[in-house]
Amino acid sequence: MIEKEIMDLVDAGEMLPLMEEFYTIQGEGYHKGTAAYFVRIGGCDVGCHWCDVKESWNAATHPPTAIAGIVENASKHSNTIVVTGGEPLTWDMGPLTNALKAKNLTTHIETSGAYPLTGTWDWICLSPKKNKLPVGDIYQYAHELKVIVYNKDDLRFAEEQAAKVNADCILYLQPEWSVREKVTPMIVDYVMKHPKWKVSLQTHKYLNIP
């Protein structure tokens, strides 16, 4: 297949720049502790300085992979499929989620919302970032809002974002891993004063699993 044909398929969402795929335990947010198959899609221009998967940013370093193969691998391991990145909404998620749903699989996405929402999702985790805010109507569809807290100003940002989501959206504050010892007490205190929020931890890192 020539390069232009491949790029056309990527643009159509029939192939995706796959960074990695693995079966593990969801470590964060509402579904923490749940066995899930993760599909990590390359490509992200949000540019969080504390990102722990910076190797995902350059989509060109991750091979365009047919979604049929991704779905086949996923279906062998779990009913719960988590699509993450990078920023998966950089690409059209419609074909991938249609193929996953055709196998009766449950579809989750972890996204900053920096690109328009595509795909059919059973669970949307919206984790907005200050330097590239969510676009479109994702706020009204998000099932959980997860704000990463690196410093005190992120609490202000969290409230700003919480004002935009739907009434049923579950609100989480999660310490950024590299400063967790500093910010976790601040988050705990804030949640106790503002109990509409919950604390999310990266439990997979404490458990030393992917």
Image (cartoon, grey):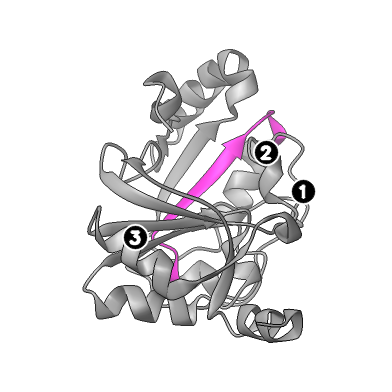
Query: For this rendering, which residue is in front, 91 or 185?
Result: 91
Seen at 52% across and 16% down, the residue is 185
User: Tag 3's secondary structure?
Assistant: helix
In the image, residue 111 lies at what x, y percent? 55, 58
* Closer mark to the observer between disc 1 and disc 3: 3
67 in relation to 11, above or below: above
What residue is pinned by disc 1? 47
Q: Earlier in the sequence, mark 3 or mark 2?
A: 2
What residue is pinned by disc 3? 73
| Disc 3/disc 2 C-alpha distance (Å) | 27 Å
In the image, residue 8 lies at what x, y percent? 68, 86
User: Tag 1's secondary structure?
Assistant: loop
- Asked if residue 97 lies left or right of residue 33, the reply is right
Q: Quadrant of the C terminus?
A: top left
What residue is pinned by disc 2? 51
Q: Earlier in the sequence, mark 1 or mark 3?
A: 1
Q: Is residue 111 magenta?
A: no
| Disc 1/disc 2 C-alpha distance (Å) | 8 Å
Q: Quadrant of the N terminus?
A: bottom right
Whether pointer 1 and pointer 2 mark residues with C-beta atoms closer than 8 Å, the reply is yes
Q: Which residues are magenta?
A: 141-153
Seen at 59% across and 45% down, the residue is 158
| Disc 1/disc 3 C-alpha distance (Å) | 30 Å
Seen at 33% across and 59% down, the residue is 74
